[in-house]
Amino acid sequence: MYSKIWLSKPHFETDDLDYFKTTMESNWISTVGPNIASFERSIEDVFNKNLKAVALNSGTSAIHLALKMLHIGAGDEVICQTFTFCATVNPILYCGATPIFIESEQETWNMCPVFLEEAIKDRLKINKKPKAIIVVDSYGMPAKWDELLEISNRYEIPIIEDSAEAFGSMYRGRLCGSFGNYSILSFNGNKIITTSSGGALLCKDEQDKERAIYLSTQAKTTSSLYGEVGFNYRMSNVLASLGIEQLKVLNKRIEQRRDNHTKYHSLVSDLNGVKLQQENSSDFYSNFWLNCIITNNPKISKSALIDEFTKQHIEVRPLWFPLHLQDYLKGSLYYGDNFSETLFEKGLCLPSSSNLTNEEFNRIGDVFNSFKK
Ligand SMILES: *Cc1c(COP(=O)(O)O)cnc(C)c1O
């Protein structure tokens, strides 16, 4: 019996666990302790100290906090990419605000600048200016940042960059996570580096960072006073110990995932009608967190592939189901051409762990080969 091949498996080394044990023995196991600030400094180093990082307990809470930093509240409208994970949009609802969904363009599968501008113009006509725009770098692929930033600047609407899947990816040589007025990272177990669960808010200056830390630690002002409604969103010192060690191998993990991409390129190159999602030009540098294919061949359909991979104990997953079609979000405003429905119909995410072995790649190749007959 074969062991299961997972979509995106955590990848630890013994050093990570040694430091984790030392931290447990130090007794600093809550959301206070030296590792948290040290992990934040290491994240800031990745961004050449151009940004400030706040370590939090998840990427989802980082998005919620970003919205709070922008004073989003009940009755506000926030623009959001529809082709993404539910964690991108849910924090908008936590704030009592209303999401407006934007379709993706066909090159990066991220927010389409044309539909974005159409939505903004449309809302401005009735004097309802959206308060923020949440853009995702899906599956590690950077969005079309030049166009999106130009619109954000022209209409003076801040961007929150959901870079949960794109740590280490770059657009025109600039790191994802540096494009938003606020940006977020996730260190959940399936991401490129992990603290088991965890996330970070990236902001522009020390003042922002201090306010985000304050809000994430119950808005405590003195030992018995609280300034406002706060949150319990800080990362624990124990998990920060994992983050410190994981950050040291970030570049290695990117190489390994990009290497997977090269291997997939040859695996699917002679499969008729099957296309691997790729960087569209040298402007885009993806960490290839997940590799995705689109199949236009009815003989190699998404469901046939899922059946065969599942039979071989290989985890694959459909691409995101568009958020504006989720039951609980139906009726939301949507601007687009339904491209994400096609992505969902025809697309599949393939196993992309950084510790994927050659033997496992051969098993994946065997499944593809069985469709060539
Ligand atoms: C993982 C993920 C998140 C949320 O991160 P958590 O740490 O799991 O809360 C948000 N957005 C996207 C696109 C993600 O993939």
Image (cartoon, rainbow, N blue to C red):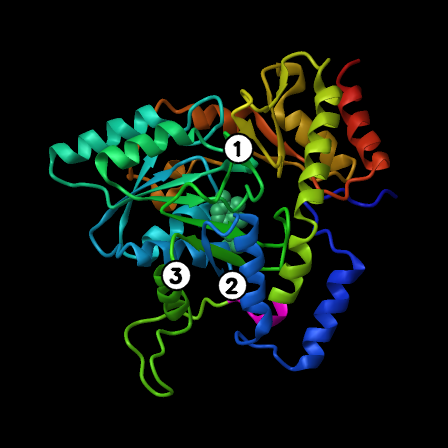
x, y (%) of residue 127? 11, 39
Give the mark nearer the N terminus: 1 vs 2: 2
Indicate the amino acid at tag 3: Glu
- Closer mark to the observer between disc 2 and disc 3: 3
Secondary structure type for disc 1: loop
- Up-down relation of residue 355 to residue 258 (above or below): below
Which residue is denoted by mark 3 in the rendering?
A: 206
Q: Position of residue 28 (x, y in %)?
A: 61, 79
Screen quadrant of the C terminus:
top right
Residue 57 numbered tag: 2
Residue at image x 38%, y 59%?
65
In three-dimensional space, the C-alpha distance between marks 1 and 3, rounded to whole angstroms, equals 25 Å
Write the residue at 80% across / 32% down: 361
State which tag comes first along the sequence, 1 or 3. Answer: 1
Residue 173 is labelled as 1
Closer-to-camera residue (130/349): 130
